[in-house]
Image: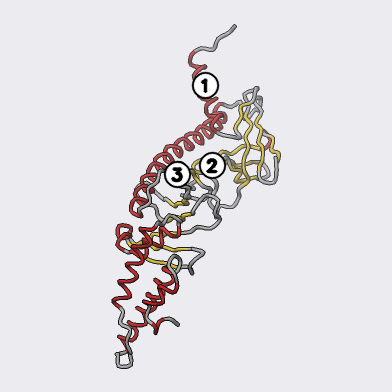
Amino acid sequence: MKILNFKNFILNEATSQIYDEISGVNSMSDNGYELEAEKFDNENHTAPFGKILLTKNLANNIRLSFNNYKGKKISDLWIPKDHCDVSDINDDTTKITIPGNSAWLEIDDNRSKVEDFIEDLYNSKMREKLYSGDLVDTIRDDIYFIMNIIGIPCEVIDVKKLDGDNEYEVILDNGISIDVNKKSSEHLIGSFKMYKNKGESSPSVEIKSKNGKHNFYFYNEDLPNLDDESDLSDIKKNRRLYYLLKKSLGVDDNDDRENFYKYFEEKLGNFKDENDTNLSPEMKKSRIDDGKKLKDLKNIANTFKNEDEIRKIFPKNLVN
């Protein structure tokens, strides 16, 4: 039995690894190539990553391309049509077959162009894997940091890349699912949507980073849509926000409810139920704003406290 020399064995092993990592790239028995390419001719849109793209289909030539994970074009490969077979697999995908005995492919420089194109695509995918691995680790760290601040102990079970750019799904051991947007490993998560569980179609909480602050949006069946703004580090100091976070995610307990109700009572104690006829316009406006805030807190308290009990302590001129 004939055994390959060591150099050819290593080259064959490397080539096999490349083909295993890139779907739609096959080496033919006659030393030709069979490539599957996604049709993509709109250069105003971001091309998909990790795929060979058919970006030009002219009368005499075709152009194959691929982009890196940032959407930047990395490499082009031009192939004359009279030295390959171009056939549609479906409306979106084309198969390009370059026979090993093609006069064009038998020219060493042309074969090198094909092999370099495939190898560059492979290397780009490997770099993306390393980048994604680093990013996944920082996303885990971010989630632990944020959930610790919120006061919800958890373990990260899984982090998965989603179809959108910079979008990942995080699954926690308490069932909570989080869609996060993370643009780089250097920055904290830019925005994320939190679901009570993976089966929920709509988020319970959405947090967006803006100008150094975080905007919080709450979507709860018991309450009208609410929002708030805070630094992450100040969440526990904002007792309204802190309770809304835990309630919206279904993890509030008796201690959380009691702490919020004490805060509600404190705010009621600071509000004077008096005639405001003689107040200045500025003071009247301030009282109106304070009254709206108290009604907001009352709506939250109503979700767990008896209405009659709240009515006894709530200012009568704010009931309507």
Residue 72 visible somewhere in the drawing: yes
Q: Residues within 10 Å of mark 2 (few under 14, many from 20)?
A: many
Q: CA distance from mark 2 to mark 1?
A: 24 Å
Residue 253 screen position, x and y as percent = 40, 56
Secondary structure category for the residue under label 3: loop
Mark 3 residue crowding within 10 angstroms, few (<14) / some (14–19) / many (20+): few
> Which residue was labeled with disc 1?
13
Q: How is the image coloured?
A: secondary structure
| Residue located beneath label 2 in the image | 66
| Type of amino acid under label 2 | Phe
Q: Residues within 10 Å of mark 1 (few under 14, many from 20)?
A: few
Say which mark, if any, is on residue 176: none
> In front here: 163 or 255?
255
Vertical comparison of 80 with 248: above or below: above
Which of these two is toward me, 229 or 49?
229
Residue 217 versus residue 85: which sits nearer the camera? 217
Reply above or below: 303 against 184. below
Q: Distance of mark 3 from mark 1, alpha carbons?
A: 41 Å
Q: Are marks 3 and 1 in contact (CB under 8 Å)?
A: no
* Between marks 2 and 3 in the image, the one whose residue lies nearer the viewer: 3
The image position of residue 86, as x and y in percent, is: 69, 38
Amino acid type of the residue tagged 1 in the rendering: Glu
Which one is in front in this view, the residue at disc 2 or the one at disc 1?
A: 1
Q: What residue does disc 3 label?
A: 173
